[in-house]
């Protein structure tokens, strides 16, 4: 946000091509807490009727106001990303007395429930107040990634949750995931879309793990989940877009479970292969053809949105990934001068073909 998106010409371009943006970092707990450290405490009465201590004057929402304002004047909606995640969340949030010491003990589940409830409520209240005050109550944040990346890459039928997570360390079960969707349902606006977001959803093992999580959420009476977010940091040759055990297979598995799908973090890495703009164009076209074939239609679940993870190749996160060291990545739709790449026309052609075949 602080880089490209502060330039009015870029905002103008984005609002021409997109309906919605996702902030790469600014709605993650570290940023929402603005890296402040808790000092004074105040009381919070949680849904169990008990009173818990929460840090006074927090969260203070850093630059959220400016971001909401920018989105509002650019006529863009925001995908909220993310409420509950093992990464980019301060460790003190999980510790007895909000201790900053590394070896401090974790709190018990009841205390963590109260803290999670307080956090989700605080974020929702802040955003709703902004929307009421400045945007006549019309929503700017229309959906939330409620939980991100809680399923293990090596999910099996007996063990499917990610364990290198402070959330897991406190709960040792999927209870925090279910509770996150209960609190989100309680405090988010009714029309706000609640999403579970993860990467490699098309890996057959992980897909099964995510389905178990969906079942737990759906079994909880006060929880609501509307969609699965498929991060989609894909490679030019992995996975297959259609066919057995493909990306499309995962999309249809989620649809058959009664959920919508959002493609939330799409970029197509050339990986260790040399970059070919023509190959990338063909791949984007293939993906968008499949997305459109599975799009949501009246009365049926389907894909409700696609987000590309970044604008220009120069800023892609992939070039900081150890796995691609020495192999430059060109995964996005725009060149560094913000002119379109052939890949952009791949998306365009897929949309045009789709329209003509209607
Ligand atoms: C994950 C997260 C994103 C981002 C990327 C790396 O996909 O969901 O928020 O941190 O990793 O850019």
Image (cartoon, rainbow, N blue to C red):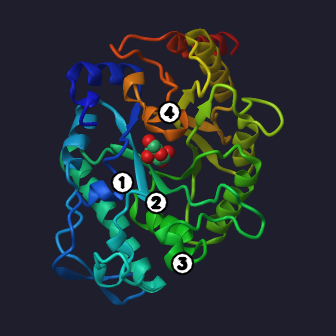
Q: Does the residue labelled 2 lie within 8 Å of ligand 1?
A: yes
For disc 1, the marked residue is: 28
Quadrant of the frame with the N terminus: top left
The label nearer to you, 4 versus 3, is: 4
Q: Are marks 4 and 2 in contact (CB under 8 Å)?
A: no
- Residue 122 location, x and y as percent? 29, 65
Badge number at residue 325:
4
Q: Does the residue labelled 1 lie within 8 Å of ligand 1?
A: yes
Q: Is mark 3 within 8 Å of ligand 1?
A: no
Badge number at residue 85:
2
Q: Is mark 1 on a helix, strand or loop?
A: loop
Quadrant of the frame with the C terminus: top right
Q: Are marks 2 and 3 in contact (CB under 8 Å)?
A: no
Calculate the distance from the C-alpha at mark 4 to the C-alpha at mark 3.
37 Å
Q: Do the residues labelled 1 and 2 touch (CB within 8 Å)?
A: yes
For disc 3, the marked residue is: 171
Q: Which residue is drawn at 38% across and 10% down?
A: 339
N-terminal label among 2 and 3 = 2
Residue at the bottom extreme, as displayed = 50
């Amino acid at each position: 946000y602080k880089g490209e998106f502060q330039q009015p010409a870029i905002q103008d371009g984005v609002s021409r091509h997109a309906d919605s943006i996702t902030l790469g970092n600014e709605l993650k707990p570290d940023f929402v807490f603005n890296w402040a450290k808790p000092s004074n405490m105040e009381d919070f009465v949680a849904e169990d009727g008990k009173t818990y201590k929460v840090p006074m004057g927090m969260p203070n929402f850093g630059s959220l106001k400016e971001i909401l304002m920018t989105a509002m004047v650019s006529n863009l909606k925001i995908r909220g990303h993310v409420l509950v995640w093992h990464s980019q969340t301060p460790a003190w949030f999980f510790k007895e007395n909000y201790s900053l010491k590394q070896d401090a003990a974790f709190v018990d589940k009841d205390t963590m429930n109260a803290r999670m409830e307080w956090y989700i409520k605080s974020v929702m209240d802040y955003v709703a107040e902004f929307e009421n005050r400045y945007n006549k109550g019309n929503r700017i944040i229309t959906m939330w990634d409620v939980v991100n990346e809680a399923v293990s890459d090596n999910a099996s039928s007996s063990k499917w949750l990610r364990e290198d997570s402070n959330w897991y360390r406190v709960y040792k079960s999927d209870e925090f995931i279910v509770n996150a969707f209960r609190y989100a349902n309680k405090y988010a606006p009714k029309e706000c879309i609640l999403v579970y977001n993860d990467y490699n959803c098309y890996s057959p093992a992980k897909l099964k793990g995510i389905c178990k999580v969906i079942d737990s959420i759906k079994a909880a009476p006060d929880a609501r989940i509307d969609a699965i977010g498929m991060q989609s940091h894909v490679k030019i040759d992995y996975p297959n877009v259609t066919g057995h055990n493909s990306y499309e297979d995962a999309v249809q598995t989620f649809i058959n479970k009664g959920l919508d799908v959002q493609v939330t973090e799409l970029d197509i890495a050339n990986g260790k292969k040399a970059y070919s703009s023509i190959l990338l164009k063909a791949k984007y076209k293939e993906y968008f053809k499949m997305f459109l074939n599975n799009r949501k239609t009246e009365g049926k679940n389907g894909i409700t949105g696609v987000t590309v993870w970044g604008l220009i190749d120069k800023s892609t996160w992939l070039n900081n990934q150890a796995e691609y060291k020495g192999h430059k990545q060109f995964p996005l739709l725009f060149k560094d001068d913000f002119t379109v790449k052939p890949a952009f026309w791949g998306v365009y052609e897929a949309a045009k073909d789709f329209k003509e075949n209607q």
